[in-house]
Structures are given as C-alpha cells and as structure tokens.
Amino acid sequence: MTETLMNCAVRAAGDRRPGTVGPPVDGVHVRLVDDDGTVIQTSDDATIGEIQVRGPNLFLEYLNRRDATAEAMQDGWFETGDVATRAPDGYIRIVGRSCSSIPGSPRSRSPASRTRISASASSPGSSPPPTGARPCRN
C-alpha cells in the first residue's frame, strides 16, 4: 500500500502469532468499521470490519486527485480496503479485502456498495481466506 507506511508490527520481543500483523505501531491509530461505517468496539478476534488508519504515516493526497483523496479519507481516517479482526490485546488479523479498485476510479467503492471478501475464514485456527484482488460489485 503506497498511501501509508507501516501500520502494524510485531515487536522484537512481542508474541509472534501466525496470521496476524501485530498491534498498531506507536503513533498510528487503527480502527475497524462495519459496512455502515460504524466503529466496531469489539475486540474478540472474530468480528470483521474494514481497517481505517490515522497517523503521521499517511500520504498527504493523491497527486492532482483531490476527489480521490476525499473519497479515500473519512473524517481524517484512511480507508485501506483491508478487512480484519482485532484480538483483545490489539493484534490485527487481516482476513481479506473489501474491494480492489483504485480510489476515485469509476469502479471505486462506496460504503453502501462494499463487498466483503472474507467469509468463513475469519476465526482463529481456520484456513486462511482466498487471496488476490477481486473486482468490486457496484
């Protein structure tokens, strides 16, 4: 992802857990939102939401594309398009993509038309979800 630098990481002395990317790095705020854009407060490593990021690691804007920047940013939070779960201790498990389109393109996503790609493979210990880009359904 070129819009952000590192968002989450397992610390050198941290607990390494297969399938996770670790907790957010210092200074970076990560939240999960549901299909309606409501912030998910649950941290049970099972509830799935789209990752939104805020912090000094974000890009300023898409070059000459203020419209695309406005679409990708919601109240200062960047919509990554990744869907994930969050464990009680903050570890993030990415389980799929909500969309693979380019922000601002005619096929870009909107909160009402997002398609979740991660279905049953979101619980700990289950098989990983399919990977790869998937087209949005508008």
Image (spheres, rainbow, N blue to C red):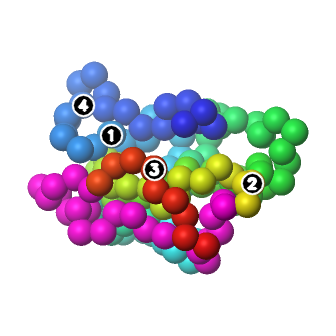
State left or right for residue 11 relative to residue 7: left
> Does the magenta-highlighted stretch encompass residue 62?
no
Point out the stretch of residues depicted in magenta: 107-129
Tag shown at residue 104:
2
Q: CA distance from mark 1 to mark 3?
A: 23 Å
Mark 4 vs mark 3, foreground winner is: 3
- The three-letter amino acid code for the residue at tag 3 is Ala
**What residue is shown at x 27% (from left), y 56% (from top)?**
129
Q: CA distance from mark 4 to mark 2?
A: 38 Å
Mark 3 in CB contact with mark 2 (< 8 angstroms):
no
Tag shown at residue 22:
1
**What x and y, as percent, mark residue 137?**
55, 70
Mark 4 vs mark 2, foreground winner is: 2
Give the mark, 3 or 2, whose residue is nearer the N terminus: 2
Q: Residue furthest left?
A: 125
Tag shown at residue 14:
4
**What x and y, as percent, mark residue 37?**
58, 71
Give the mark, 4 or 1, whose residue is nearer the N terminus: 4
Binning the other alpha carbons within 10 Å of mark 2 as few (below 14), some (14 to 19) or many (20 upward) gives: some
